[in-house]
Image (cartoon, rainbow, N blue to C red):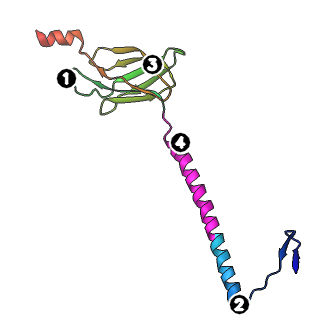
């Protein structure tokens, strides 16, 4: 004998459960099936979400970084670094930190880099290419002015 279920519109064979324990087992099995399904959905969502966050964290910016030192290798703190793009003449300025380091995130282009620090000659590097997702390291060893060298030498 077949039984018609209106809300799904499927025709299923009529089954009879033999005891209360059969109903209880079926209820427990359904709860486990629902729990496993929800767990799989949650794990899938979490791993997809984690991958998208890790891709965002791994996004790499192009740019120029480096270190500014004196002729003896001592770091130069507070040196002003000016970076100028060839295509647009736009400039970016940075100041060397306590370790003499500087960093600038830049769009791909070709750049000129200038360094100015009190007590040293100005320094420059021209035509530094910055490629997409590439970082160039441009270190500077600043020279002492000629008058300082003459005073020490005489």
Give the prevailing secondary structure in the magenta stretch: helix
Q: Nearer the viewer, mark 1 or mark 4?
A: 4
Check disc 4 and report the residue beneath it: 56
Q: Position of residue 116 (x, y in %)?
A: 34, 18
Q: Secondary structure at mark 2?
A: helix
Location of residue 20 (image quadrant): bottom right
User: What crowding class fits label 2: few (fewer than 14 Cα within 10 Å), some (14-19), or many (20 or more)?
Assistant: few
Q: Earlier in the sequence, mark 4 or mark 2?
A: 2
State the CA–CA distance, disc 1 to disc 2. 90 Å
State the CA–CA distance, disc 3 to disc 2. 78 Å
Closer to the camera in the image, 98 or 25 = 25
User: What crowding class fits label 4: few (fewer than 14 Cα within 10 Å), some (14-19), or many (20 or more)?
Assistant: few
Task: Say if mark 4 contacts mark 2, CB within 8 Å.
Answer: no
Q: Position of residue 95 (x, y in %)?
A: 38, 27
Check disc 2 and report the residue beneath it: 20
For residue 72, which numbered disc appears in the image?
1
For residue 81, which numbered disc appears in the image?
none
């Amino acid at each position: 004998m077949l039984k018609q279920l209106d809300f799904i519109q499927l025709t299923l064979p009529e089954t009879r459960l033999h005891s209360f324990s059969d109903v209880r087992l079926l209820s427990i099995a359904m709860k486990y099936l629902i729990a496993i399904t929800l767990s799989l959905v949650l794990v899938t969502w979490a791993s997809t979400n984690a991958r998208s966050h890790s891709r965002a964290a791994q996004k790499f910016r192009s740019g120029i970084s480096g270190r500014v030192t004196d002729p003896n290798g001592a770091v130069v703190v507070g040196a002003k670094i000016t970076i100028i793009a060839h295509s647009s003449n736009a400039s970016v300025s940075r100041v060397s930190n306590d370790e003499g380091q500087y960093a600038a995130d830049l769009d791909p282009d070709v750049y000129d880099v200038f360094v100015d620090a009190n007590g040293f000659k100005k320094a420059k590097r021209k035509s530094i290419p910055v490629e997409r997702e590439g970082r160039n390291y441009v270190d500077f060893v600043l020279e002492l002015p000629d008058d300082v060298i003459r005073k020490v030498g005489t």
